[in-house]
């Protein structure tokens, strides 16, 4: 009988030890996973902030001003038809197609084209979950929305696909997916009225 008790107590301690190791391993794994997820969120925020800075540094000095001019000249208040912008020449309003913004010698000196190229790069990163989409949208949302809407209205002269699908596929795909919530707020660069 005395021989059975020491053997039984060894088995119980081994069993308790095994369960204790399992519980501690699960807790450690949970903590590691949670830390990894939080680090990924922080990394997306840092990447987003760096990309917003890169966006602003990549633009020329007057690109935002050129966008504002184009924003106003494409509005209904300016008299622009859908897919066109208005310029004044000798006090006469002339409607020009938005495709002129992507032709040689554009009236905005290439500002909208530069923005569209940068938005395609940013969209690629957003689609691959490398950025905090809400932060990017807050900083650049109005610019992104208007440039995207202008690109959608341009027909491609060389294929059956839309101009945006051919030239800015990631930017187009970002708006086709539901990665941007229409209820998110964004910084206002210009208003009409």
Image (spheres, rainbow, N blue to C red):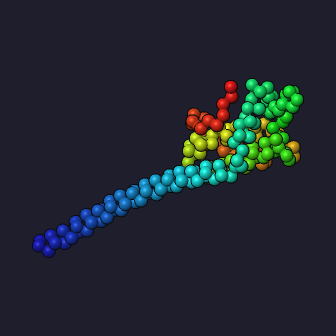
Which quadrant of the figure contains the N terminus?
Answer: bottom left
36 sits to left or right of 72: left
Q: Quadrant of residue 97?
A: top right
Q: Position of residue 53 (x, y in %)?
A: 61, 51
Q: Is 178 rendered above or below residue 16?
A: above
At a point 66% along the width and 44% down the height, the residue shown is 174
At a point 81% along the width and 31% down the height, the residue shown is 86
Q: Position of residue 83 (x, y in %)?
A: 80, 33
Q: Nearer the viewer, residue 93 or 82?
A: 93
Q: Quadrant of residue 32?
A: bottom left
At a point 66% along the width and 34% down the height, the residue shown is 190
Residue placed farthest to the front in the image? Answer: 90
Q: Tell me how many marks there are.
A: 0
Q: Nearer the viewer, residue 192 or 131?
A: 192
Residue 165 visible in rendering: no
Q: Position of residue 184 (x, y in %)?
A: 57, 36
Q: Position of residue 101 (x, y in %)?
A: 81, 42
Q: Quadrant of residue 162?
A: top right
């Amino acid at each position: 009988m005395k021989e059975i008790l020491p053997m039984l107590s060894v088995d119980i301690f081994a069993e308790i030890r095994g369960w204790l190791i399992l519980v501690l391993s699960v807790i450690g794994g949970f903590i590691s996973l949670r830390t990894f997820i939080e680090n990924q969120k922080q990394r997306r925020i840092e990447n987003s902030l760096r990309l917003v800075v890169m966006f602003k540094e990549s633009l020329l000095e007057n690109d935002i001003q050129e966008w504002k001019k184009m924003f106003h000249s494409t509005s209904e208040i300016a008299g622009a038809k859908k897919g066109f912008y208005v310029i004044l020449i000798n006090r006469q309003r002339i409607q020009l197609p938005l495709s002129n913004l992507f032709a040689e010698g554009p009236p905005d000196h290439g500002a909208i084209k530069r923005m569209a190229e940068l938005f395609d790069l940013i969209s690629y990163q957003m689609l691959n979950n490398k950025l905090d989409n809400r932060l990017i949208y807050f900083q650049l949302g109005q610019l992104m929305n208007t440039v995207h809407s202008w690109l959608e209205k341009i027909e491609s002269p060389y294929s059956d696909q839309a101009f945006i699908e051919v030239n800015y596929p990631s930017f187009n795909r970002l708006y086709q997916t539901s990665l941007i919530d229409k209820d998110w707020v964004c910084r206002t660069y210009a208003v009409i009225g």
